[in-house]
Amino acid sequence: MRSAQIDPDGTTVRWVELPGAAPPRVYLHGLGASSAPYYTPAATHPALAGHRSLLVDLLGFGISDRPDGFDYSLCGHADALAAALTQAGVDGADVVAHSMGGAVAIVLADRHPHLVARLVLVDANLDPSVPGAASSAIADYTETDFLTRGWDETLDRVGRHWRSTMRLAAPLAVYRSAVSLARGSGPTPRETLQNLPIPRTFVYPAVDGPPAGAAELTAAGVRLVAVADSGHNVMLDNVDGFARAVADALLPGGSRESGAMSPRPLGAGEAHAND
């Protein structure tokens, strides 16, 4: 486990690091998740292994600190992550980011462009207040109501896999992160993504069809890649298909294949969706 103190009060971001060659790869989890449990099988897959890989937990989640005074906004997460990556000597990284982590990664690339060379978003949140999203359901509570009853109600609703990592998170971090994600402020992640001047790939489960606004994303240069035999947690549901899709996206110059579909099922993931 590696760490970086990002604030004089001792606040620390932590990650699991796999040694390897440059350029470094940074993996970011979604709401209530943790990067090592979600990404280790894919990051060590033969298609992706061999690069320096940082499986980072955002503040409030997993093995990172849970400061009460942090705002847990998308910008706050991005700036804290930037401070940690800078201390880790990371520059020009390939960032692979799932769900809410994808929104954070977009903000990171916009606010700290030297840190991000290429972006691979995994069924990421691009718009605020998406109907049915877990972040929207959490944001419907007041902060007090969520901390007193909403936390337990949320844990009761989610699937076993998600619950196993969510219970490691600070309830305050889950709530404030969800509010920032669901309500938005300023340019949306979608708007920012479409204007980023770096290679960008959006990986999504084939069963869901292309993401909303697919034509506009493609016109802006965002490559869309479907992965078969998976749901929202693509990296868990189809490790082989996900790893090959990411590896293809990170080829020098980027592949122009129309999609990455696994030729065989590699095990059904638990039926749940998280941010």
Image (tube, helix red, strand yellow):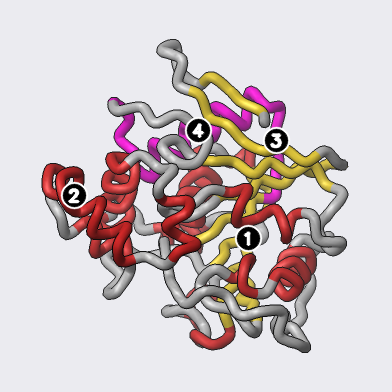
C-alpha gap between disc 1 and disc 3: 16 Å
- x then y, percent, for residue 102: 50, 56
| Above or below 148: residue 218 | below
Picture quadrant where residue 103 is located:
bottom left
163 or 92, nearer to the observer: 163
Circles 3 and 2: CB distance less than 8 Å? Answer: no
**Residue where numbered disc 2 is placed:** 146
Instruction: Give, as a single range, the part of the protein colored magenta.
Output: 69-94
- State the separation of the CA atoms marked 1 and 2: 32 Å
**In terms of secondary structure, where does tag 4 sit?**
loop
Front in this rendered view, residue 95 or 110: 95
Left or right: residue 56 versus residue 242 is left
Q: Is residue 176 magenta?
A: no
Q: Residues within 10 Å of mark 4 (few under 14, many from 20)?
A: many
65 over 94 or under it: above or below: above
Residue beneath disc 1: 120
First in sequence: mark 3 vs mark 2: 3
Which of disc 4 and disc 3 is earlier in sequence? 4
Horizontal and vertical percent position of residue 263: 77, 88
Secondary structure beneath disc 2? helix
Q: Which amino acid does the dot numbered 3 rest on?
A: Asp
Quarter containing the C terminus: bottom left
Q: Secondary structure at mark 3?
A: loop
Most foreground residue, 264 or 84: 264
Nearest to viewer (mark 3 / mark 2): 2
Q: Quadrant of residue 191?
A: bottom left
The residue indicated by pointer 3 is: 91
Residue 18 in sight: yes
For image coordinates 20% across by 54% down, the residue present is 150
Q: Which is more N-terminal, label 2 or label 1? A: 1
